[in-house]
Image (cartoon, rainbow, N blue to C red):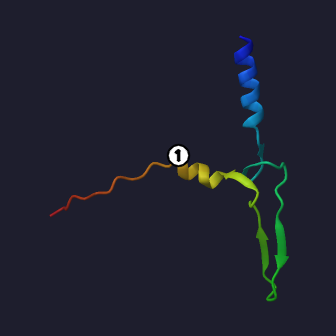
Amino acid sequence: MIKITILSITTLILLSGCLNKHGVSAKVYSDCKEYYDLQGYYHKECGEDDIVTYKEIGEFFKKEQPKNNKNVW
């Protein structure tokens, strides 16, 4: 019983991460780089410190559509 408890606590500590609006990262607030270029366009670069993004999670669980190799005629 003690081994299971120690194992579960260790697993929770090692697999813990912070959920933010971009995905799972090691920080609570992800550092975003915001700037305007010479033409006046606004740029915002976020998610460089993310471990896993929600987009990557969605692509992992997305099922591939089977390719239809049969001809109609």
Residue found at the far left of this picture: 73
Q: Which residue is mark 1?
A: 61
Residue at position x 65%, y 51% from top? 54
Can residue 37 be seen at all in this image of the molecule? Answer: yes
User: Quick check: 64 left or right of 14?
Assistant: left
Task: Work out whether residue 11 or residue 31 is closer to the camera in this orientation and state it.
Answer: 11
Name the image quarter holding the C terminus.
bottom left
Quarter of the image with the N terminus in it: top right
Relative to 10, 58 lies left or right: left
Please, which residue is most extreme toward the bottom here? Answer: 39
Q: Residue at x 84, y 71 (%)?
A: 34
Residue 8 appears in which quarter of the rendering? Answer: top right
**Of residues 27 and 3, the one drawn nearer to the viewer in this rendering:** 3
65 up-or-down from 41: above or below: above
Q: Quadrant of residue 17?
A: top right
Residue 5: x and y in percent read 74, 18
Q: As displayed, is residue 38 above or below residue 15?
A: below
The three-letter code of the residue at mark 1 reads: Phe
Residue at x 82% of width, y 88% of height: 38
